[in-house]
Image (cartoon, rainbow, N blue to C red):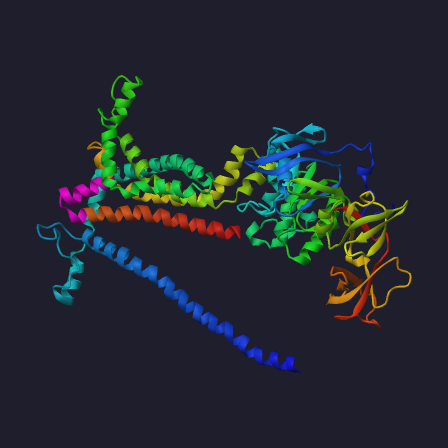
Amino acid sequence: MKSLGSIRRDFAPWNDPNAKPYIQFDNVTKKFGDFTAVNNLSLTIFEREFFALLGASGCGKSTLLRMLAGFEEPTAGRILLDGQDLRGIPPYRRPVNMMFQSYALFPHMTVENNIAFGLKQEGMPKPDIEKRVAEMLKLVKLEQFAKRKPHQLSGGQRQRVALARSVAKRPKVLLLDEPLGALDKKLREETQFELMDLQQELGLTFVVVTHDQEEAMTMADRIAIMDKGEVMQVATPAEVYEAPASRFVAHFVGNVNMFEGKVAERSANTTRITGASGAQIVVENGGAAAAANADIVFAIRPEKIKVSSKKPADAVNALEGEVYDVAYLGDMTVYHIRLDDGQIIRASALNAARVTEDPLTWNDRAWVSFRPDAGVVLAR
Amino acid sequence: MSNIAVTDAAAPSTAAKPFLNRLGAGFVNRLVIIVPYLWLLFFFLIPFVIVFKISLSQTAIAMPPYTPVLDFSDGVSGFFAGFRNLNFDNYVWLTQDALYFKAYVTSVIIAAISTVLTLIVGYPIAYGMSRAPATIRPTLLMLVILPFWTSFLIRVYAWIGILKPEGLLNQLLLSLHIINQPLVILNTYTAIFIGIVYSYLPFMVLPLYSSLEKMDYSLIEAAKDLGCPPTSAFWKITFPLSLPGVIAGCLLVFIPAVGEFVIPDLLGGSSTLMIGKTLWNEFFANRDWPVSSAVAVILLLLLTVPIMLFQQAQARAQEQGK
C-alpha cells in the first residue's frame, strides 16, 4: 500500500511496538441503568498525543472523558494512567484537568482567581501562584482582563480563561469537552490552531471530545471514531479519511460515494467488481480482503472522481450518466451525476482556473472516471 | 445604481427609529415603575403616616382612644393649630422605662438566633431539594408549602400540645427512657426558638432553594477537577453562590421574627419578653394607642435602617466588582 505521507508532525508512537501507552482503557463498560453508554471499550493513548474522540451525540465519548476525569466510575474494566489504575481515585486527586463545555468558570471570582483556584488547592506558595497566573494570562493573551469577572468577558475570552485555568496546574493530561463548541466559526478555526500550538508548547497530552469532524481532523494526531459506545476506528486523520475501516466510518467522516457490488475476479494486485446493474470497475487491492463472489462496497471520495463531457481515453474506470445537479461553491464545484443505472454520484472539482472552456451544466451527458487506487473496498 | 438609492432612502429612517424607540420605551418603563410605587404609597406609606401621627398624640378616654391630631374637623386653621399639640412625649417615655429597651434588645437577639437556627435547618433541606431528581422536586416544594394551608395560629397551638410537660415529646422521651423527668420546654425561650424556626422555615427554604437550584453543577465538578475536595468545594463555590438566597432568606425570617407576637405569647408564656408582646399589651391591655404606635415606629426604624445600610453596602460592593 502506498503511504499516506506525514500529514502533521513526526510523531507516531502508535506505530512503535515498544512505545508505552500513557492512558489505557481496558475493556471498559459503563452502564446507566439499562443504557450502555460505553461498551467493552479498549483504547490506548500515548504521552504528548493530541487525541480526539469523535462521534455523534450520545455515542459515549463524553462518558469516556468523564470516566478519565473521575466523575464517573466504569461499571466494568479499568483505566490506567501512566501505569496507575485510576479506580477509586476521586477527581480531586487525579493528575488530569478538564476544560468543560460550559467552561464552568466560577462566576464570583475574577479571571485571576479562577486561574489560581487549582494552584491554591495544591498549596502552592503565594509568589509562585502569582507568577504562574501571570504566565497563564500571557499565554492566553488576557493580561489586561485579570481583574474582570467572567460575566464581563466575551465568549472567546471566557474560553481562554477556561483553558488557562485547566492548564495552570500542568496536568499530566488535559481533557477538553467540546472546547470550541460555543464559539462562532471564524473564532473556532483560529482557536483550533492556537490549541495545537499550546499543546506543542506545553508538551501535554490532550484528549478532546468533539462532534465536529473538521475540528478533530485539524487538531488531532489520532482520532477515535465512536458509535453506540464502541470505537469504530482509531487512526490518524489521513487514515480515517483515506482508508476508513468500515462503511460507518466512511460515511461519518466527509462525503463518500458507495458502489455496491460483488467481487467478480481477483488478481494479485487488482479486484474486478461487478455492480448491481452490471457495470464493471477495477480497483486496487487493500482494505477488506474479499474472496470471489463476496458482497462488498467500494467507497470513493467525491474529489477523487473526475467529471468530463467525453469519455477519457486512458481511464480504467469510466461510467456514463447525466448531470443532475451543479453546486458552485467558489473554491470548487460539486456535481451530482445520475448514472444510467440510477445511482447518483457526488463528484467535486477544484476550480483551478477562473474560466473553463467546456462547462458542464444540468442535463448534459457526462462521464465520471477514477483511478483504481482512488477508493477502498469495504465489507458490505 | 439602485443599491445606492436604497441606502440613501434607508438612512434617515434608521436615524429616526432609535429616537422613537427610546421615547416609547422610556414611557412604558416609567408606567411599569409607577405601579409598585403606588402600591407602596397606599399600603405602606399612608398607614405609616397614620401610625406616626397617632404616636405624636396623647391617650384620651374617647373613641379612638387618643387626642385628635392634624384633624381637618376644625378647618384649616385648626389643622395648623394642631401642630402645637404635637409632641414626642411618647418617645421620651420609651427611653425612661427600661422595659422597652430590654424588649427591643431581647427581640433582636431572639430573632437573630432564630434566623441562624432556621438557616442551619433550612440550608440542608434546600440543598437536598435542589439536588433531588428533577421529577420529585415539585413534590418536595409542595411539601414545604403545605403547612401554609393550615392556619398559622392552629399550628402554633399544636406545638403547645407537643412541648407541654405532659405533651407528646415528653411522653415519647419518657417511654424511651431517655429522660426520667418531663422536660420544661413550654414557656421558655427554647419554645420560642422552636416555634420561630418551625413557622418561618419555608421563608428560608424557598429563596435558598431557588438560588441553589439554578446553580450549574458543573461548577462543583470543575472545583473537584482542580483539586478541591467536596466539603471545601461547598464552602468555596456552592455557599458563596447561594449568598443572595441566604441573605433573602435571613431577611424574610429576621424581620417578621423581631416583631413576632403569636409565638412568644403562646409558647413563651408570661416570663419571656419580646417587643411584639409589649406592643400588644400597650395596645389592647393598656389601650394606650399613642405609646404602642411609638413602639411600632421605633421597631420599624430599627429594622429598616440596618437593611437600607446593608443594601447600600451591597450595591457598592457590586459596583466595585465591575
Q: Is residue A281 above or below residue B195?
A: below
Segment colored magenta = B274-291
Report the residue at 55% width, 52% height from top.
A151
Please say whether residue A242 is visible from this viewpoint.
Answer: no
Front one among A55 and A298: A298
**Magenta residues: mostly which secondary structure?**
helix
What x and y, as percent, mark residue B302? 31, 46
Residue B247 lies, in percent from the top left, at 41, 44
Q: On the rendered structure, is B171 left or right of A200?
A: left
Residue B293 x/y as whole percent: 21, 49
**Residue B285: which quarter of the image?**
top left
Residue A277's spot in the image, x, y percent? Answer: 77, 57
- Nearer the observer, A114 or A264: A264
Residue found at the far left of this picture: B61
- What residue lies at 77% left-to-right and 61% top-to-bottom? A347
A306 or B142: nearer the viewer: A306
Q: Seen in the image, is B154 located left or right of residue A294?
A: left
Q: Is residue B108 left or right of residue A72?
A: left
Magenta segment: does it hold B280? yes
Q: Nearer the viewer, residue A288 or A136?
A: A288
Left of A100 or right of it: where is A257? Answer: right
Q: Is residue B69 magenta?
A: no
Q: Is residue A249 visible?
A: yes
